[in-house]
Image (spheres, helix red, strand yellow):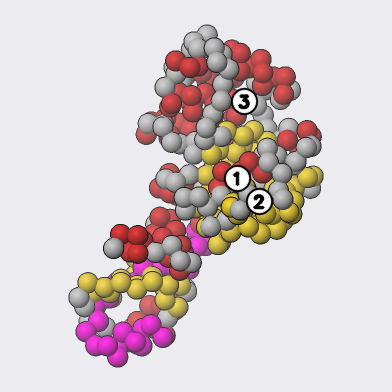
Amino acid sequence: MIEAKNIRKCFDSVKAIDRVTAKIEEGHVFGLIGTNGAGKSTFLRMVAGVLKPDEGEILVDGQNVYDNPEAKGKIFYISDDQYFYKSGTPADMVKLYKSVYPAFDEPRFRELMGKFGLEMRRKINTFSKGMKKQMSVLCGICAGTKYLICDETFDGLDPVMRQAVKMLFVKEIEERGLTPIIASHNLRELEDICEYVGLLHRGGILLEKDIDDMKLNIHKLQCVVKEEEMLLRIKTGLQVVTCDNRGSLYTITVRGKREDVENFMEQVNPVFYELLPLSLEEIFISETEVNGYDIQSLLF
């Protein structure tokens, strides 16, 4: 398990991470989402032991990760801005990673490179962005580490390759309990693979939940309300997160159990109502709007 305990990181006067506490359980896919500049990459660099928190600590299986080779040896980190030797080839990367990760599986790496259509002796600087991401993922898979940290890993991959990478993750989770930690702006990509999600906003963590549990307790309520008194009753009787309308059609995001919301709406008896599931993207927007990241104010 990875634990972040009240960590804080500043760059001059900028608070990149501010008092974040979180747990990442083993054997599950953990998705990290957040607004631009929320501190996702900084958080991942601290988890990987690249950066040291100004305050607090990050533990990997009970050990402080910073300046600890044993703890770092359990993690493979794929940054958003990847770096390779100037004239290096995948074969050169194998030599490097085998010196760092004793369990690196070279035969499997060569096999997967062939399946992905990547040449071992070709210079990496001639690879496309997507090809570099593919190779990095394969290095991470074959390193044999317990945790795989991916910062915007799906960015640059075509749909077929994205699906292939997800299938590799699933296989590794089932066979050896790999724990992928994936940060991405593409919430649709995370929704079908992540089991748990952490939402960062302005350096702090807003929530850390099981995705299925999250969706069970937040809903999109659409209803036709013609009387102001009925609308007020809905707003006071339900736990409303956001409310928007076009004429008499209201779209309201509410918290609570589905059956409780349905029972309440049956009593209110509007002209029409229905409860719809929210996507991860809609949940993200709702949660950040509540905390001052209002899309409407950005556009108008």
Disc 1 to disc 2, C-alpha distance: 8 Å
Q: Which residues are magenta?
A: 212-236
The residue furthest front is 12
Task: State which tag comes first along the sequence, 1 or 2.
Answer: 2
Kindly state the secondary structure of the residue where label 1 is placed. Answer: helix
* Marks 1 & 2, CB-CB < 8 Å contact: yes
Q: Which mark, residue 142?
A: 3
Q: Amino acid at mark 1?
A: Thr
Q: Is residue 226 above or below residue 111?
A: below
Q: The C terminus lies in which quarter of the figure?
A: bottom left
- Residue at 73% x, 35% y: name it: 72
Viewer can see residue 143: yes
* Relative height, residue 196 to residue 231 (above, below): above
Q: Position of residue 3 (x, y in %)?
A: 70, 51
Q: Secondary structure at mark 2?
A: strand
- In the shown orientation, is residue 241 left or right of residue 58? left
Q: Which mark is residue 9?
A: 2
